[in-house]
Image (cartoon, helix red, strand yellow):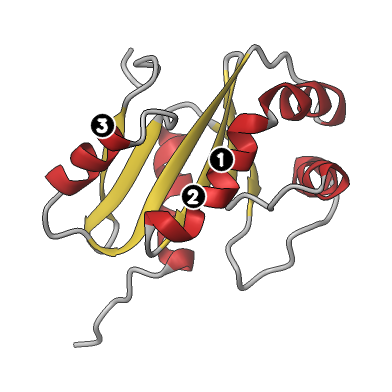
Amino acid sequence: MAKIRIDQAHCNFHLSRWLANHDWRILFTDAGRVTRGGAGSQGNCLRIFEQLGLPIPDIIAFRQSEMLIIEIDKAFAKAARSLESYRANMNRIVTELRLGVQLDVDQLSIGFCRTGLVKCPEQLLALSRLHVGLDLWVGFTGPGSLVCYWTGRAVFEK
């Protein structure tokens, strides 16, 4: 039996699907194996981040009036600079996203998803306590099986 790698493309696919199943509209995904741009929200989001000179996120999702930006990487330290730049430029990002994708954005939340197998999900919870500037922490306990810690508003609960 082939071993499934929990790489960036795997995480992007399953996390995007999980978000969509929880009423998030996926505006942008950077799966790594496909073209980033194009028409519609995918191209608009890419252009906005390029024009602002910011790193390109892996996932951008929208629900109600909240925009969610997610970085996916093997280690938090590798994604930290991108995540910090999103937080530092929140007002610019929200303003441009309101205009570029024509959605009424009132809040920007930022999340991190760790690639690879998370053997101890409590490690993500511990990281969330050390890095309070993030709203969502995601890891995979198996192929397609994710665990999320939402440290911002509990918008996933209905």
Q: CA distance from mark 3 to mark 2?
A: 15 Å
Helix, strand or loop status at disc 1: helix
Instruction: Provide residue 71's location: percent of width, then percent of height.
Output: 51, 50
In the image, is residue 130 above or below residue 35?
A: above
- Sequence-earlier tag: 3 or 2: 2
Instruction: Provide residue 118's location: percent of width, then percent of height.
Output: 20, 58
Q: Is residue 122 visible?
A: yes
In the image, is residue 144 above or below residue 137?
A: below
> To which residue does mark 3 refer?
129
- Sequence-earlier tag: 3 or 1: 1
> To which residue does mark 1 refer?
84
Image quadrant holding the C terminus, namely top left
Residue displayed at 34% across by 16% down: 154
Q: Farthest bottom residue? A: 1
Instruction: Provide residue 78's location: percent of width, then percent of height.
Output: 47, 61
> To which residue does mark 2 refer?
80
